[in-house]
Protein backbone atom coordinates (compact mmCIF):
# COMPACT_ATOMS: atom_id res chain seq x y z
CA UNK A 1 0.00 0.00 0.00
CA UNK A 2 1.36 3.41 -0.95
CA UNK A 3 0.82 6.50 1.14
CA UNK A 4 -1.08 9.66 0.44
CA UNK A 5 0.60 13.01 -0.28
CA UNK A 6 -0.83 16.40 0.59
CA UNK A 7 0.76 19.41 -1.08
CA UNK A 8 0.14 22.06 1.55
CA UNK A 9 0.53 25.81 1.15
CA UNK A 10 2.05 27.25 4.32
CA UNK A 11 1.33 30.87 3.43
CA UNK A 12 3.95 33.64 3.56
CA UNK A 13 5.51 32.72 6.91
CA UNK A 14 3.20 33.76 9.74
CA UNK A 15 1.84 30.53 11.32
CA UNK A 16 -1.42 32.35 12.07
CA UNK A 17 -2.01 32.57 8.31
CA UNK A 18 -2.10 28.79 7.94
CA UNK A 19 -5.49 27.46 6.91
CA UNK A 20 -7.29 25.05 9.24
CA UNK A 21 -6.90 22.34 6.61
CA UNK A 22 -3.14 22.91 6.50
CA UNK A 23 -2.94 22.55 10.28
CA UNK A 24 -5.00 19.35 10.21
CA UNK A 25 -2.74 17.84 7.53
CA UNK A 26 0.41 18.72 9.50
CA UNK A 27 -1.00 17.22 12.70
CA UNK A 28 -1.71 13.91 11.00
CA UNK A 29 1.42 13.63 8.83
CA UNK A 30 3.97 10.85 9.27
CA UNK A 31 6.54 12.88 7.34
CA UNK A 32 6.81 16.54 6.31
CA UNK A 33 9.06 17.61 3.45
CA UNK A 34 9.32 21.36 3.82
CA UNK A 35 10.70 24.40 2.01
CA UNK A 36 13.05 26.85 3.75
CA UNK A 37 10.34 29.51 4.03
CA UNK A 38 7.95 26.97 5.55
CA UNK A 39 10.19 26.11 8.48
CA UNK A 40 10.41 27.67 11.94
CA UNK A 41 7.21 28.07 13.96
CA UNK A 42 5.05 26.61 11.19
CA UNK A 43 6.58 23.21 11.86
CA UNK A 44 5.37 23.35 15.47
CA UNK A 45 2.04 22.11 14.10
CA UNK A 46 3.62 18.88 12.87
CA UNK A 47 2.77 15.69 14.75
CA UNK A 48 5.36 14.78 17.40
CA UNK A 49 7.54 12.02 16.02
CA UNK A 50 6.95 12.88 12.37
CA UNK A 51 9.99 12.94 10.09
CA UNK A 52 10.86 16.56 9.24
CA UNK A 53 12.93 16.83 6.07
CA UNK A 54 14.20 20.14 4.67
CA UNK A 55 14.16 20.18 0.87
CA UNK A 56 13.94 23.91 0.20
CA UNK A 57 15.73 25.79 -2.55
CA UNK A 58 17.01 29.35 -2.16
CA UNK A 59 18.63 31.48 -4.85
CA UNK A 60 22.39 31.72 -4.47
CA UNK A 61 22.59 28.94 -1.88
CA UNK A 62 23.38 25.22 -2.16
CA UNK A 63 20.03 23.52 -2.72
CA UNK A 64 18.77 20.02 -3.54
CA UNK A 65 18.03 19.39 -7.18
CA UNK A 66 14.39 19.13 -8.14
CA UNK A 67 14.63 15.54 -9.35
CA UNK A 68 16.07 14.58 -5.96
CA UNK A 69 13.16 16.25 -4.15
CA UNK A 70 10.63 14.48 -6.37
CA UNK A 71 12.37 11.13 -5.87
CA UNK A 72 12.45 11.60 -2.10
CA UNK A 73 8.74 12.42 -2.08
CA UNK A 74 7.93 9.26 -4.02
CA UNK A 75 10.14 7.13 -1.77
CA UNK A 76 8.44 8.41 1.39
CA UNK A 77 4.99 7.84 -0.10
CA UNK A 78 5.86 4.27 -1.08
CA UNK A 79 6.59 3.54 2.58
CA UNK A 80 2.92 4.26 3.31
CA UNK A 81 1.31 6.74 5.67
CA UNK A 82 0.44 10.38 5.22
CA UNK A 83 3.03 12.68 3.70
CA UNK A 84 2.90 16.47 3.64
CA UNK A 85 4.88 18.38 1.04
CA UNK A 86 4.93 21.82 2.65
CA UNK A 87 5.44 24.73 0.25
CA UNK A 88 5.62 28.42 1.06
CA UNK A 89 2.81 30.69 -0.08
CA UNK A 90 0.47 28.77 -2.37
CA UNK A 91 1.82 25.53 -3.87
CA UNK A 92 0.78 26.50 -7.39
CA UNK A 93 2.62 29.84 -7.56
CA UNK A 94 6.27 29.46 -8.60
CA UNK A 95 6.64 26.45 -6.31
CA UNK A 96 7.79 23.74 -8.77
CA UNK A 97 4.53 21.94 -8.02
CA UNK A 98 4.08 20.46 -11.47
CA UNK A 99 7.30 18.43 -11.48
CA UNK A 100 6.35 16.79 -8.19
CA UNK A 101 2.79 16.13 -9.34
CA UNK A 102 4.10 14.40 -12.46
CA UNK A 103 6.42 12.22 -10.36
CA UNK A 104 3.54 11.12 -8.12
CA UNK A 105 1.21 10.43 -11.03
CA UNK A 106 3.85 8.32 -12.78
CA UNK A 107 4.32 6.36 -9.54
CA UNK A 108 0.57 5.91 -9.08
CA UNK A 109 0.49 7.75 -5.75
CA UNK A 110 -2.71 9.48 -4.63
CA UNK A 111 -2.43 13.12 -3.67
CA UNK A 112 -4.25 16.41 -3.05
CA UNK A 113 -3.45 20.12 -3.14
CA UNK A 114 -4.27 22.32 -0.14
CA UNK A 115 -4.13 26.01 -1.15
CA UNK A 116 -2.27 28.56 0.96
CA UNK A 117 -2.30 32.35 1.32
CA UNK A 118 -0.16 33.63 -1.60
CA UNK A 119 2.76 35.81 -0.56
CA UNK A 120 1.69 38.43 -3.10
CA UNK A 121 -1.65 38.84 -1.33
CA UNK A 122 0.08 39.00 2.04
CA UNK A 123 2.54 41.61 0.75
CA UNK A 124 -0.25 43.87 -0.48
CA UNK A 125 -2.02 43.49 2.87
CA UNK A 126 1.18 44.33 4.76
CA UNK A 127 1.60 47.46 2.63
CA UNK A 128 -2.02 48.44 3.22
CA UNK A 129 -2.97 48.50 -0.46
CA UNK A 130 -5.32 46.58 -2.77
CA UNK A 131 -3.97 44.56 -5.68
CA UNK A 132 -6.78 45.87 -7.86
CA UNK A 133 -8.18 49.35 -8.07
CA UNK A 134 -11.38 50.45 -9.76
CA UNK A 135 -10.72 52.25 -13.07
CA UNK A 136 -6.90 52.27 -12.77
CA UNK A 137 -5.77 48.70 -12.02
CA UNK A 138 -8.16 46.18 -13.52
CA UNK A 139 -5.48 43.58 -14.21
CA UNK A 140 -3.00 41.77 -11.95
CA UNK A 141 0.04 39.91 -13.24
CA UNK A 142 2.54 37.71 -11.40
CA UNK A 143 5.96 37.02 -12.90
CA UNK A 144 9.13 35.26 -11.80
CA UNK A 145 12.24 37.42 -11.73
CA UNK A 146 14.74 34.72 -12.60
CA UNK A 147 15.08 31.53 -14.60
CA UNK A 148 16.84 28.29 -13.67
CA UNK A 149 20.24 29.96 -14.08
CA UNK A 150 19.33 32.93 -11.87
CA UNK A 151 19.16 35.34 -14.81
CA UNK A 152 16.21 37.42 -15.96
CA UNK A 153 14.08 35.09 -18.13
CA UNK A 154 14.64 35.81 -21.81
CA UNK A 155 11.08 34.94 -22.82
CA UNK A 156 9.04 37.16 -20.50
CA UNK A 157 6.56 39.57 -22.10
CA UNK A 158 8.21 42.93 -21.41
CA UNK A 159 5.46 44.87 -23.16
CA UNK A 160 2.86 43.39 -20.81
CA UNK A 161 5.06 44.08 -17.79
CA UNK A 162 5.43 47.71 -18.89
CA UNK A 163 1.65 48.22 -18.83
CA UNK A 164 1.22 51.12 -16.41
CA UNK A 165 -2.42 50.15 -15.87
CA UNK A 166 -1.62 46.70 -14.48
CA UNK A 167 -0.67 45.70 -10.96
CA UNK A 168 2.54 43.70 -11.27
CA UNK A 169 4.16 41.44 -8.67
CA UNK A 170 7.69 40.16 -9.29
CA UNK A 171 8.67 37.01 -7.40
CA UNK A 172 12.33 36.26 -6.68
CA UNK A 173 13.45 39.33 -8.59
CA UNK A 174 15.72 41.42 -6.35
CA UNK A 175 18.93 40.62 -8.23
CA UNK A 176 17.44 40.97 -11.71
CA UNK A 177 15.13 43.93 -11.10
CA UNK A 178 17.67 46.59 -12.17
CA UNK A 179 17.91 44.97 -15.62
CA UNK A 180 14.15 44.45 -15.74
CA UNK A 181 13.49 48.07 -14.79
CA UNK A 182 15.75 49.34 -17.59
CA UNK A 183 13.87 47.25 -20.15
CA UNK A 184 10.48 48.36 -18.82
CA UNK A 185 11.41 52.05 -18.90
CA UNK A 186 12.64 51.62 -22.50
CA UNK A 187 9.14 50.31 -23.30
CA UNK A 188 7.35 53.27 -21.79
CA UNK A 189 6.92 52.51 -18.10
CA UNK A 190 7.44 55.82 -16.26
CA UNK A 191 10.63 55.83 -14.16
CA UNK A 192 8.61 57.39 -11.34
CA UNK A 193 6.01 54.60 -11.35
CA UNK A 194 5.41 53.76 -7.66
CA UNK A 195 7.01 50.54 -6.45
CA UNK A 196 7.21 48.55 -3.23
CA UNK A 197 9.85 46.15 -1.97
CA UNK A 198 8.26 43.74 0.51
CA UNK A 199 10.81 41.62 2.38
CA UNK A 200 10.17 38.68 4.73
CA UNK A 201 6.44 39.34 4.56
CA UNK A 202 4.39 38.43 7.65
CA UNK A 203 7.46 37.47 9.71
CA UNK A 204 9.15 39.40 12.55
CA UNK A 205 11.78 40.50 9.99
CA UNK A 206 9.24 42.09 7.65
CA UNK A 207 10.27 45.31 5.94
CA UNK A 208 8.21 47.39 3.49
CA UNK A 209 10.14 49.91 1.39
CA UNK A 210 8.26 52.37 -0.85
CA UNK A 211 10.02 53.98 -3.80
CA UNK A 212 9.73 54.42 -7.55
CA UNK A 213 10.71 51.84 -10.13
CA UNK A 214 13.94 53.70 -10.96
CA UNK A 215 14.86 54.39 -7.33
CA UNK A 216 14.21 50.80 -6.32
CA UNK A 217 16.32 49.52 -9.21
CA UNK A 218 19.18 51.77 -8.06
CA UNK A 219 18.87 50.56 -4.47
CA UNK A 220 18.90 46.91 -5.49
CA UNK A 221 21.89 47.48 -7.76
CA UNK A 222 23.87 48.59 -4.73
CA UNK A 223 22.77 45.83 -2.36
CA UNK A 224 19.98 43.33 -3.08
CA UNK A 225 20.47 41.57 0.24
CA UNK A 226 19.42 38.00 0.95
CA UNK A 227 15.98 38.40 2.52
CA UNK A 228 13.13 36.73 0.59
CA UNK A 229 11.18 39.47 -1.13
CA UNK A 230 8.52 40.51 -3.59
CA UNK A 231 8.50 43.61 -5.75
CA UNK A 232 5.20 45.31 -6.53
CA UNK A 233 4.71 48.18 -8.94
CA UNK A 234 1.88 49.89 -10.77
CA UNK A 235 -1.22 51.80 -9.63
CA UNK A 236 -1.48 49.52 -6.61
CA UNK A 237 1.75 50.91 -5.15
CA UNK A 238 0.46 54.46 -4.85
CA UNK A 239 -1.31 53.72 -1.58
CA UNK A 240 -5.01 53.96 -0.71
Image: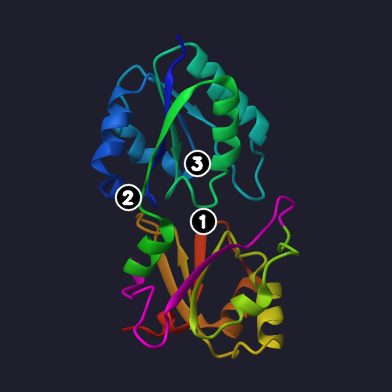
Mark carried by residue 228? 1
Answer left or right for 194 relative to 155.
Answer: left
Relative vertical location of residue 13 with respect to residue 124 in this rendering, above or below: above
Of the numbered discs 3 and 1, the one sitting upstream in the chain is 3
**Circle 3 crowding by C-alpha within 10 Å: few under 14, some 14–19, many from 20:** some
Kindly report the distance in space between the C-alpha atoms of the residues bearing marks 2 and 3. 13 Å
Q: What is the magenta range?
A: 126-150
Mark carried by residue 81? none
Kindly report the distance in space between the C-alpha atoms of the residues bearing marks 3 and 1. 10 Å
CB within 8 Å, label 3 to label 1? no
Of the numbered discs 2 and 1, the one sitting upstream in the chain is 2
Q: Nearer the viewer, residue 21 or 138?
A: 138
Q: Residue at x 58, y 23 (%)?
A: 72
Q: Is residue 75 visible?
A: yes
Mark carried by residue 14? 2
Give how far across and how far down residue 5 sits, in percent.
43, 26
Look at the numbered disc 2 and give the secondary structure of its residue. loop
- The N terminus, quarter of image: top left
Q: Residue at x 61, y 37 (%)?
A: 99
Magenta stretch: residue 137 in it? yes
Give how far across and how far down residue 104 sits, in percent.
55, 26
CB within 8 Å, label 2 to label 1? no
Mark carried by residue 36? 3
Q: Residue at x 49, y 39 (%)?
A: 35
Q: Nearer the viewer, residue 92 or 58?
A: 92
Amino acid sequence: MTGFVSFVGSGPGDPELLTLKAVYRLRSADAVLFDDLSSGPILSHARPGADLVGVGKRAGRPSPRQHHVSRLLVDYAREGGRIVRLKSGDPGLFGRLEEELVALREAGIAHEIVPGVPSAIAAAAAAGIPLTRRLTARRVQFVTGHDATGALPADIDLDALADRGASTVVFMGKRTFPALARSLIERGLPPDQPAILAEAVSTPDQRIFRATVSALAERLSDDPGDRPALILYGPLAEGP
